[in-house]
Image: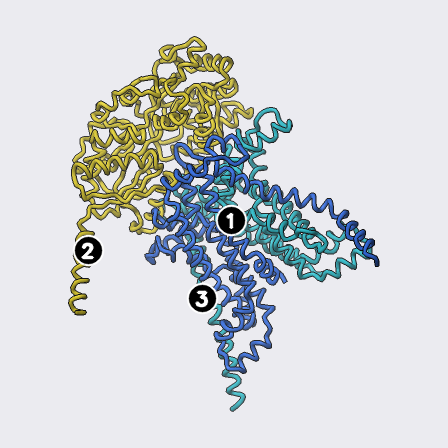
Chain colours: A blue, B cyan, C yellow
Amino acid sequence: MTDGSKKHAVSHIQRKLIPAYIFLIIVSFISVFPLYWMFTAATNTSLEVAQGKIWFGTYLLENYKNLTAQQDLWQAMGNSFFYAIVQTVATLLVCSLAGFGFELYHDKGKDRLFGILLLAMMVPQVATLIPLFTMVSRLKLLNTVWAFIIPGIATPFMIMMFRQNSRNFPIDTMEASRIDGLSEIGIFFRMYFPMMKSTYAAAAVITFMNSWNAYMWPRTVMKGNSVQTMPMLIANMSNGYAVDYGMLMLGVLFCSLPTIIVFFVLQKQFAEGITGSVK
Amino acid sequence: MKKKKGFGLLAKQEAAGWVFLAPASLLIFVMSFYPMVQAFINSLKTGSSANMKWAEPLTKNYLRMFKDKVFMTSMGNTFMYLIIQVPIMLILAILLAQLLNNKDLKFRGLFRTLIFLPCATALVSYALIFKTLFSNEGLINAFLKGIGIIQENVNWLGQSGTAKAVIIIALLWRWTGYNMVFFLAGLQNIEYSVYEAANIDGASGWKTFWNITVPLLRPVIVMTGIMSINGTLQLYDESVNLTNGGPSNTTITMSHYIYNNSLGQGVANFGYASALAMIVFVLVAVLAFINMKVGDTRD
Amino acid sequence: MTKKLVSLVLALCLVLGVSAAMAEKLSITVWDENFNGSAIKAAVADYKANVDPEFDVDLTIVSGSSDVENDITLAASSGDYSNLPDIVLFQDHYIQRYVLDYPDAWKNIDDAGINWDDFGAEKLSYSTVNGVHYGVPVDNGTVIMAYRVDLLEQCGYTIADMTGITWDKFLEVGKEVYAKTGKALLSMDGSGNDLPYMMLQAEGESQFKDGKANIAGNEKLARIIKVICDMVNEHVLILANDWTGYTNETIMQDQVAGVMNGNWIIPTMSQVTDNSGKWQITTMPTLDGGEGYAANGGSSLYITANCKNEELAKKFLAYTFGGSTETYDNALRNGGVITCCISAGKSAVYSEGVEFFNGQAVYSDIVAMGANVPIIEQNDFHYTVRTSIGNAIQNILNGADVESALQEAQEQIDFAMDI
């Protein structure tokens, strides 16, 4: 094949892909536009936002001043980070242990138990809100990080994800490690953990996002300025006798940035981890 | 002697397995199943939440919901969202995944990232973004007026039909990319040669899509299907934050109505709210079961 | 050495511990930073300056009145009040139900030493349950009808012409105003439906009769609904989708020539500084003419079961919101909170002319109007009924006839109330 014909073949393929490019560009535009709008809105006055101004304004600093004067922004950001990180660590540890146990030690009893646990996926959150609140308040955990994380530490979805991914973990390695004298828990920490990095990354992204964005439950158990989270702060701003849209959108921006950054940083591992879970 | 030792080791391994899965399993029992049982018991009671009494008859709350027009509306709305939004979203997600799986395509990573981004925004945030975009004087109206499609501002969130459409658009916007990632992952597990074979056979894009991609992705479709059904039947934030169920309860969802009955509107009726929640639980379980059975039929 | 250190640390702890116990501190939860938050801050400053310089308050701002309601519901249902603050703000229309359902959540404040006769009777009727006082009123929900006098003038009317008129006349003027200026004479939050409630109260009618919803066959209500629909169809009234649509679009984007609501709407109106000096207020129109009086919204402060220093809480409330001119003056200046305490309403600040309202002394006018608000039958299903009437209006605007829409609303409410 000459160079010319190769080039020709490539451009032919690319030409065939033009509709695909157009479609993807449109979808990407629709996906990103509301986020772009969030950025510009944060730099405009309330009135400009309400009237749909789509270009950047000069009101960013003013919005920031108003926001920090009225709301304890950095306290809420700190809280949200703290809760989301504790939640992520706890969830990953508990659910990966369970996924490891369910898959690599599996037998009939464990498979059946797993089937039962999956049912918990279908339990509506509104139904358990009040009984859970009563439980947490009796345990004297209200307004603590424990109240925030405890209902979400073990989720059927996360266990399922680790269980699926554990199929890629070679049994031979386990046997070899046992012969080398590694204990079962040693295998988990020394062999499983390092090998499953991308699964952990994917699970971390999902858990962090869910935890950061959680609203209904945190609003129920976390009371007061010192424990409030970013979504609660935004909800507080969006009510009242007059809403300042510019300031509100700046809050929305602050609330969205961390999850976007986490996704950007971990996206490669995230994709790999998800791939393992749908095998 | 040797045998005995081997047996002990096996038992030890077996025990280790149970120990590993115990914390998660216990937590799920205590944090999901136990409250669910409590909710069921509550569903048989009436009265102020500080002083609940057994209902007379016990099924009072369950019988009441059949006469409850708002609950019927909320059920209709929820199923409408389910029937329209979930299939569109899943098909769109598979389509995008298939396009992005093409090795000849340039900027794949960039496209994937951009399309996934919406689901990184907080629920509270994205509802507010859509609300301002679709407000009377908002950007969407300004744009449509600018290009001459409409003459007067459309009151998107103030009319039942358009308000429902906005909710569906918002849901599609936020969740399509999320599901796409799962399909993309599923496709990466399919040997690329399968496609090349199809291409050599001269199958068109659509044919490949329906005859190869969709069947091979069946397990992922079942999984995302269950997640979406579950998510839609429990839809709450969009109904509350975008339309607050209005106008005149025409966009309210089941979970929103349940919340209003337990905490949202001043008059707490935990018994009735719990009974309604039981219905949601049964519906989700039944639909998930059907989904699994349909997805499981092997040729 | 170590011993010394230990004892030093111990002593330090002791001192700190004692001073912490001595510090006079209360926790208070309210919603709306600018409005209710300002009122509390004014009271705290007053109490600090004049009673106890050590006094302090831990103020929490939540997103809305429903947050406080949910806190009470959850605490009472789990029997654990330890998560509640010492004092909460609670909205008037729900408090009766909450006191009856959760009697253990509240403290009787009969003995707080407040002169109850100094408050408007209509306002007190909410926070008094079975003759026992539970709450101290903060703001005053008296309804104002504000007009853009400059726009009225263009159509040949004065504010006096608009006082004591019928709703039919209002509609007529509204049509002229719309034709000449393009602005609606009134706007309202269509989902909250304050409008029919206020119009009914101005007639001395209630949404309730003998504990039941009074919708179907309520002749005055049917007339009111008809006027409302006529106004919408003639562009005299804008029904916004929700609260922010009402405030941020119709009022703050200058789409209206008239505003009618509880006087707490004034801070929202004042955000449009361009229109300063062009507004004036008067009383509401009524169906058959004559000046109408109503009250909408408003809340009071309540001591919860979790209050550890009840004496202090009572003393604080009695001194400040019980009638301190300094508290009420600053609450008005900083937050636009208007008192329903009659003596506090006579202070110099209240009788000052307000620039935004063309120099009219609106605050003293509002306090005077508040005394005329008729007491009407209230019910715990207040907002349920409002919502249903709102739904009925939507249905009528979409083509349903008044009678059947109201019948349907009645059935809906009867169902909701039968639990």
Give the label on residue B279, or none.
1
Q: Of discs 3 and 1, which sits in the foreground?
A: 3
Query: Pointer 2: what residue?
Result: C17
User: Looking at the image, is A10 positioned above or below residue C418?
Assistant: below
Is the C terminus of chain B in the top left, top right, bottom left or bottom right quadrant? bottom right
User: Looking at the image, is C383 positioned above or below residue C87?
Assistant: above
Query: How many neighbours does mark 1 have within 10 angstroms: few (below 14), some (14-19), or many (20 or more)?
Result: some
Amino acid residing under circle 1: Ile
Seen at 84% across and 59% down, the residue is A1
Task: Say what secondary structure mark 1 lies in.
Answer: helix
Seen at 31% across and 34% down, the residue is C299
Amino acid residing under circle 2: Gly
The extreme bottom residue here reads B1
Q: Chain of mark 1?
A: B
The answer to whether residue C318 is visible is: yes
* Relative depth, front residue between A67 and C296: A67
Query: Pointer 3: what residue?
Result: B23
